[in-house]
Amino acid sequence: MPFLTALVLGVGVLCLIDLVLTVGVIRRLRAHEEMLSARPAVSPSIVLPPGAKIGGFSAVSTDGVPVSGETLTEPVLVGVFSPDCPACHDRLPQFAERARSFPGGRGNVLAVLVGAEEEVADERRTLEPVALVLIEEYGTGLTKALQVKGFPSLALVDEHGKVVASGSTIEDLDKIPAHA
């Protein structure tokens, strides 16, 4: 019987130590949570931010229309998509819908598909009726000019090559800064 009493007492002491340590960990986690929430949220831009000027580029659309920084004579809607990007599959139809009603029509909408022609065939069929489609490798052409770091990348660019609004969602394009 004394052995059983000692064993129960030992288990009780271990449980008490465990409880004290758990309370300490919870307090530490709360302190870290407060420190993290106090820091300003910085989201890295996946495309040039509003106010930036796009770099030079030159390309030919899938239907033979030459496109370059010099051909931007009106505001342009730009969308950059990759076939390997799950978010692109969700946002591409939204982009196509916005492109249908964009002022100036198809000639003022650029859709960049990053990948090989056979990889982007479905996206190309969806976008060609509403946009000039460019197929290019990542880090070349318009993806380089817009400094694309992620997909999808969307931007409104004015006739001077200045980004008016940008982001990864259609809603980001609706947030035009006051200084734009």
Image (cartoon, grey):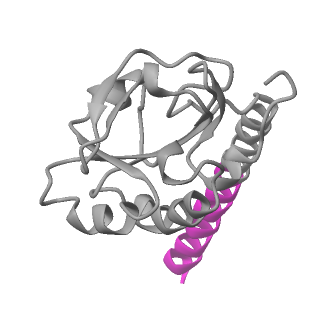
Say whether residue 120 is left or right of residue 77. Answer: left
Highlighted magenta segment, given as a residue range: 1-22
Q: Where is residue 175 shown, x and y percent of the image?
A: 77, 42
User: What quarter of the picture does the C terminus occupy?
Assistant: top right
As drawn, the residue found furthest toward the right would be 178
The rendered magenta stretch, by its main secondary structure, is classed as helix
Side of 127 where 107 appears, left or right: right
Give above or below for 53 relative to 44.
Answer: above
Residue 125 visible in this rendered orientation of the protein: yes
Residue 39 in the magenta stretch? The answer is no
Residue found at the far bottom of this picture: 1
Residue at figure coordinates x 56%, y 27% from the top left: 73
Depicted 118 relative to depicted 53: above or below = below
Q: Is residue 14 left or right of residue 93?
A: right
Q: Is residue 57 left or right of residue 53?
A: left
Vertical order, 157 against 126 (above or below)? above
The residue closer to the viewer here, 32 or 2, is 32
Query: Residue 141 location in percent, x, y?
Result: 30, 27
Res. 17 in view:
no
The residue drawn where x is 21% and y is 36% is: 137
Q: Position of residue 148 (x, y in %)?
A: 42, 31
**Residue placed at 84% from the left, 21% from the top?**
179
Q: Is residue 8 magenta?
A: yes
User: At which x and y percent is residue 74?
Assistant: 61, 32
User: Which residue is depicted at the point 60% across and 52% down?
Assistant: 169
